[in-house]
Amino acid sequence: MLNRRLFSQSAAALASAVLLSTPVASFAADEAPDAMIKRLSNEVLETIRSDSTIKSGDVDKIMVLVDRLLMPHVNFRRMTAAAVGPGWRKATPEQQKRLQDEFKVLLVRTYSGALSQVTNQTVEVKPLRAAAGDKDVLVRTEVRGKGDPVQVDYRLEKDGSGWKIYNLNVLGVWIVDTYRTQFGQEVNAKGIDGLIESLVARNKANAAGNGK
């Protein structure tokens, strides 16, 4: 059970790394979504294996990488809006920016420690079930290594610049849906500012726990 949990954590960390720290590169806007996920997964695996500070879960290094690379393949605004729920529409632009910033830190800190478990994993992308003109697709993958494979699925939308990830599923759990429940309770109890304060406090506590 312990090995299964660690492997699942490393798969989740890999998926989040794909979301948050993919290398900036110039690729055709018509690159297929499954091909994009395969490419990004391989690039992230190689980056983690070759950079000992990232592999060790160094949050500061990971955050610098995330900020520098600007998350070019993720609609992070949509992710954050979906996680916050109806309260997002009532938030000011400044509140929305703070929510995105703190949510990004939360995801990085949540999965950074599990990066140390990424070793010999490979990613198998399942055949894409989508019509040629679809603008919203599901890309299913399996992260393979020691133990049973871990299911990791991605929701992507197509915009003018290509495909963008806006949600991911690890072992049947969609990340945005999980946080929507938590964030909705905070907004109902304390409003948008209360949610921001809660995220700030949570991130500070996580930083203190990591010795940062």
Image: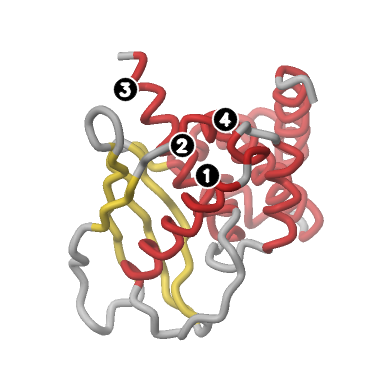
Q: Single out the residue that lies furthest toward the top.
A: 1
Real-space Cα distance between discs 4 and 1?
A: 38 Å
Name the image quarter holding the N terminus.
Answer: top left
Q: Residue at x 39, y 42 (%)?
A: 174
Q: Which of pointers 4 and 1 lies earlier in the amino acid sequence?
A: 1
Real-space Cα distance between discs 2 and 4?
A: 34 Å
Q: Which mark is residue 49?
A: 1
**Which residue is disc 2 drawn over?**
118
**Which residue is disc 3 drawn over?**
4
**Crowding near the residue tagged with mark 3, few <14, some 14–19, many ≥20 C-alpha atoms within 10 Å:** some
Q: Which of pointers 3 and 1 lies earlier in the amino acid sequence?
A: 3
Amino acid type at image mark 4: Gln
**Which residue is disc 4 drawn over?**
185
Residue 137 horizontal side relative to residue 201, left or right: left
Amino acid type at image mark 1: Arg
Q: Which of pointers 3 and 2 lies earlier in the amino acid sequence?
A: 3
